[in-house]
Image: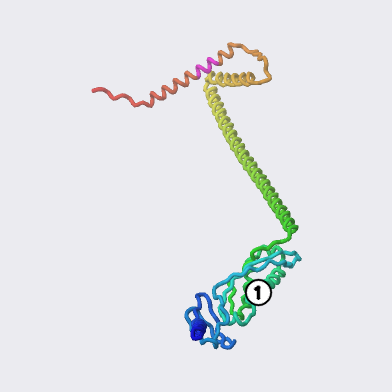
Amino acid sequence: MPGLFALVLVVVAVIVLAKLVRIVPQGYEWTVERFGRYTRTLTPGLHFLVPFIYNVGRRMNMMEQVLDVPSQDVITKDNAVVRVDGVVFYQVLDAAKAAYEVANLQSAIINLIMTNIRTVLGSLDLDESLSKRDEINARLLKVVDEATHPWGLKVTRIELKDIQPPRDLVDSMARQMKAEREKRANILEAEGFRQAAILKAEGEKQSAILAAEGEREAAFRAAEARERLAEAEAKATTMVSDSIAKGDVNALNYFVANKYVEALKAMADSPNQKMLLLPIEATGVIGSLAGIAELARESLGRQQAQSAARQPPAAPRA
């Protein structure tokens, strides 16, 4: 009997010691209850509680936690049915509120998020639901964070993982996208043809302008050449007239022979002439040519005499 009594005392002592000394791990907070009523919260570390009067109520995880939001079917504003799932990150800030303000914390969070997903996506069209995911996440985060604040929580992030339209709707969207791409390709091709036509017309315009300017310059130079030729012929005619007036017959022969040779050259160059008849005397042509030679010799002699007259006389020797 004494041995059994001693064993009972040891067991009771161990139980009392276990209820007296409590060690809260890092990242957790424990609530303390006195006869079932909440009194205070134990932070991480070593604590002592009076056994059988104070007990540990709830062990709350104070670290940031993640929950998967189950997939569900949602009807959009334009009556398209999509399947949506997501993920939520939250953190307990007040252990007492999280323990006693809501019965099942995780279930309450998940149901609240699923309800608000239906509300937010139901106010948007399908295209907006697929393209404005960041806006949807922000709206969900704002609504859910405000709703869970009385529970001592801080919802840090809500993300929609996947939005799946029906298969027939996906095929229809693919056909629409293909048609849109073909439309853009046709527009770009037409724009390319239009630009090429504009550039071609611009090039032809510049070419025509340059050709017209070239023709104008050529006509101007041809007119200038004809003007100079006419001036030369007028000057030559004047010189021949002066020589005839002075009694120089060779000048007249030169003028007539020159015109005669030019006429023969024009007749010889004509493509329609196959045979040329010259009803003239060869002696006349030779005489004209002799007059030309004589005129040339006289002109050369006058030039030499003028050059000798310009030279200064030689100095006399001593």
Position of residue 254 relative to residue 92, above or below, is above
Residue 285 location in percent, x, y? 58, 14
Residue at (67, 18) in percent of width and height: 273
Residue at (45, 21) in percent of width and height: 300
Q: Which residue is mark 1?
A: 107
Is residue 157 visible from the viewing direction of this image?
A: no
Residue at (49, 84) in percent of width and height: 3
Q: Which residues are magenta?
A: 289-295
Position of residue 239 relative to residue 151, above or below, is above
Residue at (56, 16) in percent of width and height: 288
Residue nearer the viewer, 200 or 213: 200
Is residue 230 visible from the viewing direction of this image?
A: yes
Q: Is residue 49 left or right of residue 207?
A: left
Quadrant assignment for the C terminus: top left
Residue 116 location in percent, x, y? 68, 72
Residue type, label 1: Ser
- Residue 84 highlighted magenta (yes or no): no
Residue 140 location in percent, x, y? 64, 71
- Residue 292 highlighted magenta (yes or no): yes
Q: Main secondary structure of the magenta part?
A: helix
